[in-house]
Image (cartoon, rainbow, N blue to C red):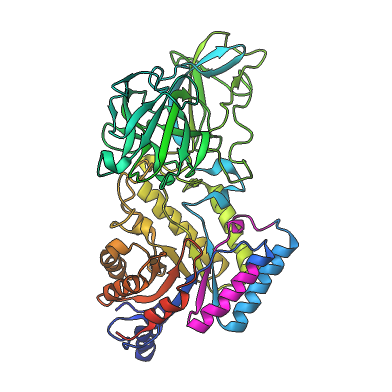
Amino acid sequence: MRRSESAASCGLCLVLAAVLAACGVEARAADAPWQWLWVYAPCNFQVDKNVDELLALMERAKKAGYNGMLVADHKFGRLQDRPENYYRNLARARRAAEALGIEIIPAVCPVGYSNSILVNNPHLAEGIPVRDCPMLVRGGRAGAADQRDLLAGVGGFEEDRGGRPTGWNYVDPCVTRDASVAHSGAASARLEKFRDAAAHGNGRVTKKLTLAPWRQYRADLWIKTQGLSSPGDVRVAVISAGGRSLNFTNLGVRATQDWTEHHVLFNTLDSTEVNFYAGIWGGRDGTLWLDDVTLREVAGVNMLRREGCPLRVTSDDGRTEYAEGRDFLRWEYPKMGRVPWPGEYEVVHPEPPLVLMPDSRIREGQMLRASFYHTVVIHDGQVCACLTSDEVFRHMEEQVRLIRQHLAPRKYFMSHDEIRVAGHCGLCAAGGRTAGQALAENVRRCTELVRRAEPQAEIFVWSDMFDPNHNARDKYYLVGSTLEGSWEGLDRSVNVAAWYFGKRSESLEFFSRRGHRIIMAGYYDASDVKANVDGWRSAAANFQGVCGMMYTTWRREYKDLEEFARLAAAPR
C-alpha cells in the first residue's frame, strides 16, 4: 500500500492507518464509505437557471452521500471578461457547497477537448502538415492548382447496371440507383432495407483513389433521409491502404431531412492510396439518398498561423522562397476558429487565396508550392490544442489563477482526455520527440502550474491518455506518433480517474502499481446501474489505492444518482 505524502513525511503509523482505512483495499472495512464519492456536473454559470439546477443537484447529492462535484464549464477557458452575473453565480455555488459540506472540484487544463481554451487564440490548435501543395496564380491570386473533381462521373450516380450504380469499386447490396429522386441530374443512390440485404446493415459506395501524400482534401455530398433510425451512422470514411482512418468528422445527418449538403476535410498524411466510403454503417430502418458526391484538393482550410506551424511558399522547383509581406499579403482566413464564436471551428470554409503584392516577384500563371499546417474537427466539433505551446500554458495558468480566486477549491481536475490530434507541429515534434513524450511534458507542466497557484492542492486527471491499456498507444486517431510513455510525466501525487470499464482491471492495476490513488468514473449512462457499479467494485477489490467512485453522466441524466450512491456504498 502506498503511503500518502503526509504519512510518508511523518512516518506515524496512526496516520498511515488512517490513509489505509480511507482508500486501501485490505484496510477498508466492507461497509466503510469511499474517501471520494463524486458526481460529474457540468454547468453554464452564465445562465442563472442552470446554476439553480446545479444547487438543487448539489443538495440531492449531499443527501445521497456524495462529498464532491466535478464541475466543468466551457467558459472556464476564458474567465477574465465575463458578465457580472457569471461571477455572482460562481459565488453562489461556492457558498452553497460550503454550507452543505460538499466540495466543488473544477475542471481545468482542457487538453484534448480544447475549444474552451482556444477561445483565447484559435491558432493555438494542433496542426497537421501540408507539404508542397501545388498552387497556381490566377488573376493575382494563388489557390490549389488541381481543381479536378476526383469523383467526376461516379458521384452523381447517373449510370447503372441492373439498377446498381456503376463506376464505384464496391457497392453494398442495399444500394440502388433511384431515377425518381435526385438532388441534381437524373438520379441518386438510394439505400434502404439494410438488414434484408446483409446482416451487418452496411450501405456504402466505395472508390479506391490515388492521392498525394500530406495534402488537404475536401469531400462534399448531398444527403436526403426519411425515417432513418441511426442517422449518426451516416458518414464519409477515408481509409489508407494500411488501414488507418484519415477522417473522424461526424456529418450531423438527421433522421428525416430534405437534400442537405455535408462536408469533410482530411489530410492524407503519408498515404498515397485510400479507399473512400460514403454511406451508412449498421443501418436498420428508413431510407437514405446520396447525390453529387465530390472530392478535390484544397489549400489553406483551417490553416494555423503560429510558432511551430510555419508557412513556406516557393517556386515550383523549390529554389526560390517567397516572403509574406513582400511577395504576398498575410495568408489566412480571418474567421478561422471563430464561427459561430471564438473557439468553434467550421469543418470547411472558403479557401483563402494567397494574394500577391503589387511588387511581388511571383508572376501571373506561375506554379508555386506551399507548405503549411491546418487543424481538423473531430466528431462533433472537438479541436485539440498544441501540447507544447507556451501561450497555451499561459492561458491555462490564468485559468487556474482565476478559478482559485473565485472558487478557492482544494482539488483541481486536469482535463486531459481523448487527445486525438497531437504530435505533428514543429513545437511538439522538435528534436524527434514523440507525441507521448510531448504529452508527458505537458501534464508535468500542467501539474506544476496548478501547484504554483495552490501548493497544497490535490490534483486529479482522466486516465485514458496515460493508460497503455487504453489510449496511450500508437496510431491513436490522428496523432502523429506513438503516445507510449505519456505516463512518465504523471507524478505519483496526481490522482487518476479511471473510466475504461471494458479493461477496468488492467487499468486499475496499472495505476495502482505506479502508486497513484484512483477514483473510478462509473455509470456512463449505463442501462444497468448495478452491473456497472458491481463491475467496478469487484475489480477494485484486487488493487490498492482505489479511493472512490464518481457518478459520470455525459447526457446530464441524474435519475440514477441515489441508486448509484447506494450501490457504491453497499457492504460487499
Image quarter for residue 208? top left
- x then y, percent, for residue 161: 29, 20
To which quarter of the image does residue 8 belong? Answer: bottom left
Residue name at image x 59 percent, y 36 percent: 336
Q: Estimate the x, y position of residue 120 in percent, counting from the top left.
A: 62, 48
Q: Is residue 3 above or below residue 49?
A: below
Instruction: Classify residue 85 as left or right of residue 140.
Output: right
- Rendered-image quadrant of the C terminus: bottom left
The location of residue 212, given as percent across then percent down, is 37, 23
Q: Is residue 207 visible?
A: yes
- Return the x and y of residue 32 as percentages of the image width and height: 37, 87
Q: Residue at position x 67%, y 62% from top?
A: 47
Q: Residue at x 65, y 71 (%)?
A: 52
Q: Is 158 placed above or below 559 here? A: above
Of residue 342 and residue 340, the one placed in the foreground of this image is 340
The reply to whether residue 217 is visible in this rendering is no
| 78 in the magenta segment | yes
Q: Quadrant of the N terminus?
A: bottom left
Q: Front-most of 167 and 236?
A: 167
The magenta stretch spans which residues? 51-80
299 versus 475 height, above or below: above
Is-magenta flag for residue 333?
Answer: no
